Image: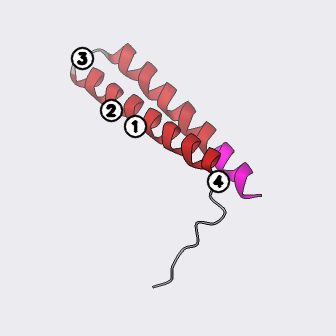
């Protein structure tokens, strides 16, 4: 098993990644809760916002590596 070097991890990247992951998780869990409460429109809105944040996170993460 190889070790991973975290030298390239900046504070800004860590904080941004942490906040975006927390936001994405919150939106997805809220959408699941709204779907169980039979509130389909609100659940769909939360899910779309969570997916948009996920796409934003992927685009930002791919830009950091280059």
Looking at the image, tell me whether mark 4 or mark 2 is earlier in sequence order. 4
Quarter of the view holding residue 47: top left
The residue tagged 3 is 38
Q: Nearer the viewer, mark 4 or mark 2?
A: 4
Residue at horizontal 69%, vertical 52%? 62
Disc 2 versus disc 3: nearer the observer:
2
Q: Residue at x 22, y 18 (%)?
A: 37
In this image, 66 relative to 54: left or right?
right
Q: Is residue 25 left or right of residue 16?
A: left
Pointer 2 residue = 29
Image location of residue 61, percent across then percent down = 65, 49
For disc 1, the neighbor class at 10 Å (few under 14, some 14 to 19, many from 20) is some
Q: Split into 4 quadrants, where in the image is the C terminus? A: bottom right
Q: How far is disc 2 from disc 1 in space, using C-alphas? A: 6 Å
Q: Is residue 60 magenta?
A: yes
Tell which circle, 2 or 3, labels the residue nearer the N-terminal end. 2
Please say if 9 is above or below 16: below
Q: Identify the secondary structure beneath mark 2.
A: helix
Q: CA distance from mark 3 to mark 4?
A: 42 Å
Depth-wise, is mark 3 or mark 4 nearer the camera? 4
Against 20, residue 31 (above or below) is above
Marks 2 and 1: CB-CB under 8 Å?
Answer: yes
């Amino acid at each position: 098993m190889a070790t991973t070097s975290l030298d390239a991890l900046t504070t800004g990247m860590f904080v941004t990644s942490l906040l975006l992951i927390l936001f994405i998780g919150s939106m997805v869990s809220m959408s699941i809760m709204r779907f169980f409460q039979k509130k389909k429109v609100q659940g769909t809105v939360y899910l779309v916002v969570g997916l948009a944040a996920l796409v934003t996170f992927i685009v930002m993460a791919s830009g950091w590596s280059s």
